[in-house]
Amino acid sequence: MKRRELVKDNPLVDVAAYLFLEDIADKQGAAGMNTYLMSLASALAQSMPEEEYDTWEAFVEALKNGDSALSTFEDVEMPTRHCVVTTESPFLRGWQEYTKRIGNFASIHYEVAEYYNSIVKPGAIDSQDIIIQTYRAEMAKRITVEGKELRVAHIATVAPDGTKRVAPEEWLPILLEKAGITQTMLNMIMRNNASVWIVYTE
Amino acid sequence: MLDVALVSLIQDMSEKAGVEGTIQYWLRVGENLARRMGKEAYMGWPSFNVALREGRTAFSIEGDVTALTDLAITDVDGDVVGYIYALRECVFNPTITRIRYSVGEVPEADRLVAEEYNNSIKDTAVCNFCVIHQKFREEVARNITVAGQQLECLQLADRGFTGETKIAVDSLKKIGINEEYVRSLLRNYACVYAIIMHGARLRGEEEEA
């Protein structure tokens, strides 16, 4: 069993974190909240040690085993050498506790994602996607494989309520080619997983 | 992941807004969380304690809470006006352990926020998260009535990740519970608090007066 599976987070801490973000949004709006979410994810990535791998195989092994900081918070599978599938959102329990104890996920979490999609990069459904996608991108900058900086790109995300968001149509063929999967395979993966992304070096 | 990310932000926030600023933020988060969870009303202490055991009260979000029903708090007339409750595990412990095995170490701001809270507000924090959840409990208690009476929460004692303990001697005197007894509870529990009826004429208070 992986170590992180042994230590479940506490619902109070997670729900409090969501409310902290909503408090920021009350004062600074979606733009301010987006800045905070991205800072939060960047600060986390910056606090992680850098990583280097001699071979692509060694990196893939570390990623799959959860030994890389890139997969510390999520369980991943790799259907191909470059395609990464996150099986369950790292925020699922917090989201479930929030909806169970507070009610509907506050609309600001979706509004900030729209802001992020228009200003930064399209690909987020809610605030949670901004955190994880920023974290992956920032963490990738701290990893080298065969001497080259790692790159990350996001293909699709599925929210805890089943809402899906796929990369823009004009980007999709390139991303799928890099991932080594077809559109049909992507749809199959999205049915029971949380997100699909790729890792590569230039 | 969100909890670990939030802790990384504490360092940044404390550097920019000062630890006092972080405390103000955390107090507001605790208050908002309690407000968002709504009001509750119970017929009497047995129904409240059953609801707590079954995870139906707002207090249950903190985890496995035990009502120490052998420790009833009585008023000057000998009527039961509250009980002592204990959390098996500190709400922040899983986060600390996850930080330990993901980032490596907890940022220094965690300790600084707790110290500032102890110096300026109440000497009961063993980590930065105590600020949120102690405030949360105080506010939750105000939103609950037992037999029509509003409740009040008193933080009594807590034990941190590294074994450091805090005992609120004044609150213990107020409810007439021995300090050493509460210290012995910390062997098996991480956080001990009392829930009493607001405005109750407690024995300890009367004796002091």
Image: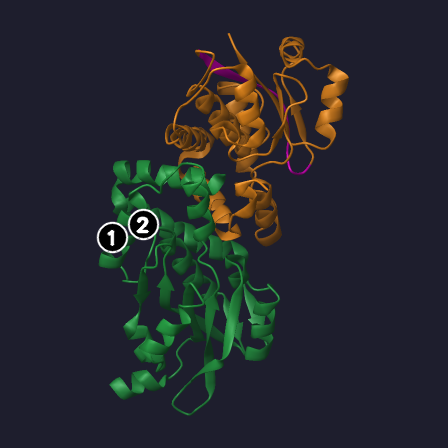
Chain colours: A orange, B green
User: Are the residues tagged 1 and 2 within 8 Å (C-beta)?
Assistant: yes
Disc 1 is attached to a residue of which chain? B
B202 shown above or below B59: below
Crowding at mark 1 (Cα within 10 Å: few <14, some 14-19, many 20+):
some
- Residue A23 drawn above or below residue B202: above
Residue drawn 30% across the image and 79% down it: B173
Which x, y percent locates residue B62?
50, 58
Q: Which residues are magenta?
A: A148-161
Q: Amino acid at mark 2?
A: Ile
According to the image, label 2 marks what residue?
A: B23
SS label for mark 1: helix
Q: Residue B116's mark?
A: 1
Lower sequence index among marks 1 and 2: 2
- SS for callout 2: helix
Residue A3 percent coordinates (x, y): 53, 42
Q: Amino acid at mark 1?
A: Glu
Q: Quadrant of residue B64?
A: bottom right
Does the magenta-highlighted stretch encompass residue B21? no
